[in-house]
Every structure is written in structure tokens, then in C-alpha cells.
Amino acid sequence: MSFEIKLPLFEGPFDLLLFFIERDELDIYDIPISKITLDFLDYLKHLEQMNIEVASEFILVASTLMRIKSKMLLPRPELDEEGNEIDPRDELVRHLLEYKKYKSVIKELSDMEGDRVTRDKRGNITKELRKLSESTNVEAELQDIDLFKLLKVYRKVLERYEIEQSKPRHEVVQYPYTIDTQKQRILNWLGNKPRISFEEVISKQPDKIAVIFNFLSILELLQLNLVTLHIGEGFNNFWIEKIELQEA
């Protein structure tokens, strides 16, 4: 014959400790650490038997209780700077009192929330849900439409349209030049005359991007030994001359 053990669920280890203290009517400032440690470990043992995963915070508090218990069993107590004996339970008591204070505040806030939810009109979930369901009724909306509402909607649509139109737009334009085409163009220009100045190349295609592509094309033609350069007059000016290939 099997039997089922039902254990209450606690929000955290301090909630469990406060339960033991209130259940056994213990003095929180003078906690019998041995008894409360056994109760705490026994609760964790039952959780493990029921294949319930024990949270790390419960394990941490269990180890803290055992550490306090061992300190209280030591013959030599710890002293503070003034020579007074330090109670190993002080830190635990301080955490319990702080948790108890926050827990009472949370309960008050929960009660206030429950009271506020039942009030009309704001916060009443049932009525709000009913109102939302009614707002999705197209026929009901059409019955309440007037000229003022239509003008408001029209104005909002216009404002949205103006915002969309004023947004910055980025357009990527592909350059109509390539190195290969500009190389061929320069060689064609050199086919009509023996040499050409870079100023004349610029004048033929004054576009800034075209000047860059033409300059890079000239450098590539120079590397391929198809043209040679001669320093000319003027600022950064030079002559481009085609190299005639000699037949072997």
C-alpha cells in the first residue's frame, strides 16, 4: 500500500524558515539553530525523494545553517573589535527580518492590486475585455462614425504620409564606367594622335568619377607596357604616349 506526501510550496528558503519559526512560535532573535536546521534539511530530503529539483538558493541556505551550527559548537567564540562576542546567528536573523519586512509590503501591495482590479472603470479586466471585443465589431463602429471622427482619421493618415515622405532615402547608383572600357577609350584616343595630355583626358570626361577611372586605367596601361608617360607643363599635368609594338 502506497501513500502520497504533499508538501507546501515556498517561494524561497527564507519563506521556509519563517514558516518554521511561525509554526513552532520561535523567537526570531533567539533561533534554536539545531532544530531549525534539522527541519530545513528534512524538507529538502522530502523534495529529493519526490524527484523535485532543489534550487541552488535552498542548498546555499542549508549550508549556511550547518556552518552556523558548527560555529555555535566551537568552544572559542568570535569577538568583534570591541571584544564583544559575535553571535553566529546575527547575519541570518538580519536577513530574515529584512525578508519578513519586504514580504509584508508585498502582501499589502497585492491586496491593493486586488482591490484596485475590482474597481470601475479603469483596471476592471472583465469590462475592458468586453469593451475590446465590442471595438472589433465593424458594424458597431460604423454606427458611431460622424464627420469629426472621419476628419481626425484623415488628418492622422496625412501626417503619417508626410512622415513617410520626409524620411531619408538612400539610393545606390552604379557608375557607368569600368577600368576595361576606359582603357580601351584611352587607346582609341591615342589611335588618332601620337600622344594626349591628361588635361585633355579630363576635358573629354570632366566628371569626377570618370577622372578617377581614367587615371586608374592609365596606370594599368602603364603597367601593361602599352603606354608611356612624359612630364608636361602645368600643375600635375603629363603626356600619355602609346607604345608601338614592334613585329619580331
Image (cartoon, helix red, strand yellow):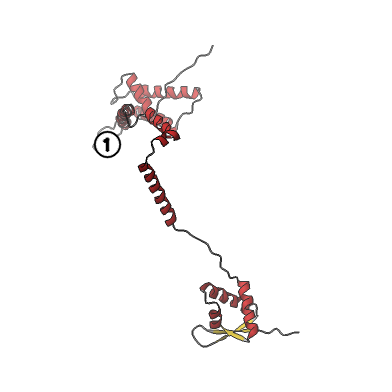
Q: Is residue 232 left or right of residue 181?
A: left
Q: Is residue 93 above or below residue 248?
A: above
Q: Which residue extends farthest bottom?
A: 233
Q: Quadrant of the N terminus?
A: top right
Q: Secondary structure at mark 1?
A: loop
Q: Is residue 108 above or below residue 219?
A: above
Report whether residue 151 is seen.
yes
Q: Quadrant of residue 244?
A: bottom right
* Rendering coords of residue 160 (x, y %): 41, 50
Relative depth, front residue between 187 and 239: 187
Q: Is residue 123 left or right of residue 6?
A: left
Q: Is residue 210 above or below residue 1?
A: below
Relative depth, front residue between 156 and 235: 156
Q: Which residue extends farthest top?
A: 1
Q: Write the residue at 39% across / 45% down.
A: 153
Residue position marked by numbered label 1 in the rendering:
80
Q: Is residue 119 above or below residue 210?
A: above
Q: Which residue extends farthest left?
A: 82
* Rendering coords of residue 60 (x, y %): 41, 32
Q: Quadrant of residue 38?
A: top left
Q: Write the residue at 28% across / 35% down.
A: 79
Mark 1 residue crowding within 10 angstroms, few (<14) / some (14–19) / many (20+) = few
Q: Quadrant of residue 86?
A: top left
Q: Quadrant of the C terminus?
A: bottom right
Q: Is residue 34 left or right of residue 235?
A: left
* Rendering coords of residue 139 (x, y %): 44, 34
Q: Which residue extends farthest front?
A: 147
Relative depth, front residue between 65 and 53: 53
Q: Amino acid at mark 1?
A: Asp
Report whether residue 88 is seen.
no
